[in-house]
């Protein structure tokens, strides 16, 4: 009886890490949603985008840097987008490198 209970407990615990893992497809869907939301809110036509930077679960954010040459000024426009995983909303802010 004790051996059966112990075996069952070990078996259940061995699957615990798998319950928290997300599939590649789930991550790719989340990244696609973050990129689409960020690009849409940036109002850029065809920006270059970095790979998503995923912050820890406490922060709950994904960052994406976008850049595009402005058709009006011909200067490079850089924006950072913070996508909130829970709400699905994004915040956009333009940035410049120090010294520029």
Image: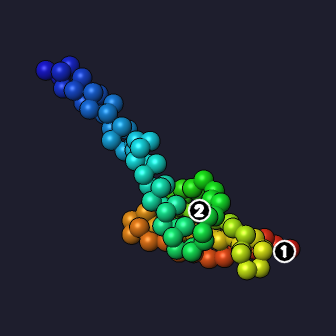
Q: What element carries label 2?
A: strand
Q: Say above or below: 32 vs 2.
A: below
Quadrant housing the N terminus: top left
Residue pictured at 43% horizontal, 63% vertical? 85
53 over 19 or under it: above or below: below
| Left or right position of 70 against 81 | right
Task: Report which quarter residue 95 is drawn in.
Answer: bottom right
**Residue 67, horizontal then vertical, whole percent:** 68, 66
Q: Distance between the residues labelled 2 and 1?
A: 21 Å
Q: Can residue 58 be seen in this view?
A: no
**Farthest residue in the front direction?**
71
The quarter of the displayed image where residue 74 is located = bottom right
Q: Which residue is drawn at 53% across and 67% down?
A: 38
Q: Which residue was labeled with disc 1?
A: 100
SS of the residue at dot 1? Answer: loop
Residue drawn 33% across and 41% down?
A: 19
Which of 13/81 is in front?
A: 81
Q: Which image quadrant: the C terminus?
A: bottom right
The residue labelled by disc 2 is: 64
**Is residue 77 left or right of 42 when viewed as pictured?**
right
At x 32%, y 33%, the residue is 15
Residue 77 relative to residue 1: left or right: right
Query: Could you tell whether 45 is left or right of 4 in the image?
Result: right
Labels 2 and 1: the sequence-earlier one: 2
Does residue 37 appear in this view?
yes
**Structural crowding at the residue carrying mark 1, measured as other residues with C-alpha within 10 Å and reported as few (<14), some (14–19) or many (≥20):** few
Q: Where is residue 64 in the image (x, y as percent from the top left)?
A: 59, 62
């Amino acid at each position: 009886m004790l051996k059966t209970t112990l075996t069952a407990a070990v078996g259940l615990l061995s699957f615990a890490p798998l319950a928290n893992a997300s599939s590649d497809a789930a991550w790719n869907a989340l990244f696609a949603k973050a990129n689409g939301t960020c690009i849409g809110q940036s109002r850029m036509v065809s920006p270059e985008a970095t790979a998503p930077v995923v912050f820890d679960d406490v922060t709950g954010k994904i960052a994406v840097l976008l850049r595009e040459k402005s058709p009006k000024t011909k200067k490079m426009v850089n924006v950072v987008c913070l996508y909130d995983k829970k709400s699905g909303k994004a915040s956009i802010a333009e940035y410049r490198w120090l010294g520029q």
